[in-house]
Image: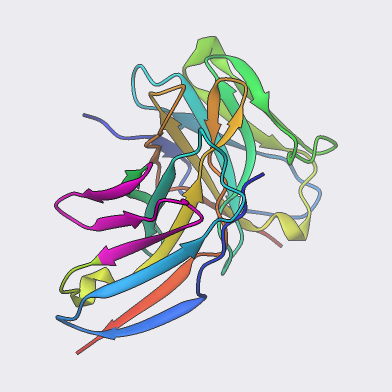
Amino acid sequence: LAKTTQPISMDSYEGQEVNITCSHNNIATNDYITWYQQFPSQGPRFIIQGYKTKVTNEVASLFIPADRKSSTLSLPRVSLSDTAVYYCLVGDWVGTASKLTFGTGTRLQVTL
Amino acid sequence: EAGVAQSPRYKIIEKRQSVAFWCNPISGHATLYWYQQILGQGPKLLIQFQNNGVVDDSQLPKDRFSAERLKGVDSTLKIQPAKLEDSAVYLCASSAQSSGGTEAFFGQGTRLTVV
């Protein structure tokens, strides 16, 4: 079972870039790295997913070094609405389906 | 595209009573997950279905929790009898891919309060 470690909380001002790093030392060859965002009273929402190097979409970028033992979620120019809990997941295989195992997440607080 | 539907949104019951939650996943999604999320914690996987078969229920308290997925589509999660520590949000999620990277879609959850 690949375990992830990420900071419990982070604070940022609106307009800044936020980088959240996740450690996953025991990542397996077939594992993908996935980040989810969760607002209060809502279910988690998929942000981005990657296997290696760099992935970018309209919301965030994901940086994965060559050894894949860590990853960094980058949120450019955050706004107040980015205040949420961010979870780093590493795909854990059960049969032929991916098992989504959540950790405690990083609580991001964005202020003016 | 319709999202994952869950009902009810809220439920309050007394301890030792039974309760059931319903989930309708996104059409065509083969994988369905049930999670329990206690306030301040990350979601904890209770059970995972692939079509109508169980692929992981290692963290499901089987003495009181049960789940089924009817014809590989809708699913119900039942608790009988409920305990105070079962107070949590129960999240259902579904995904289309069965291998490689997976994007799961979550419902809004059912908030259960056991008094």
In the rendered view, does A60 fall on the left or right side of B82? left
Residue sitting at the far front? A66
Based on the picture, tell me whether residue A24 belongs to the magenta stretch: no
Between residue B86 and residue A112, name the one nearer to us.
Answer: A112
Q: Quadrant of the N terminus of chain B?
A: top left
Q: Position of residue B91 (x, y in %)?
A: 51, 45
Between residue A9 and residue B8, name the one nearer to us.
Answer: A9
In the rendered view, does B32 fall on the left or right side of A41? right
Q: Quadrant of the C terminus of chain B?
A: bottom right
Q: Position of residue A26 (x, y in %)?
A: 62, 50
Q: Which residues are magenta?
A: A51-74
Residue B98 appears in the rendering: yes
- Which residue does the image show at 39% across and 53% down from the upper left? A36
Q: Position of residue B46 (x, y in %)?
A: 66, 40
| Total numbered badges shown on the rendered structure | 0
Between residue B102 and residue B88, name the one nearer to us.
Answer: B102
Quadrant location of residue A80?
Answer: bottom left
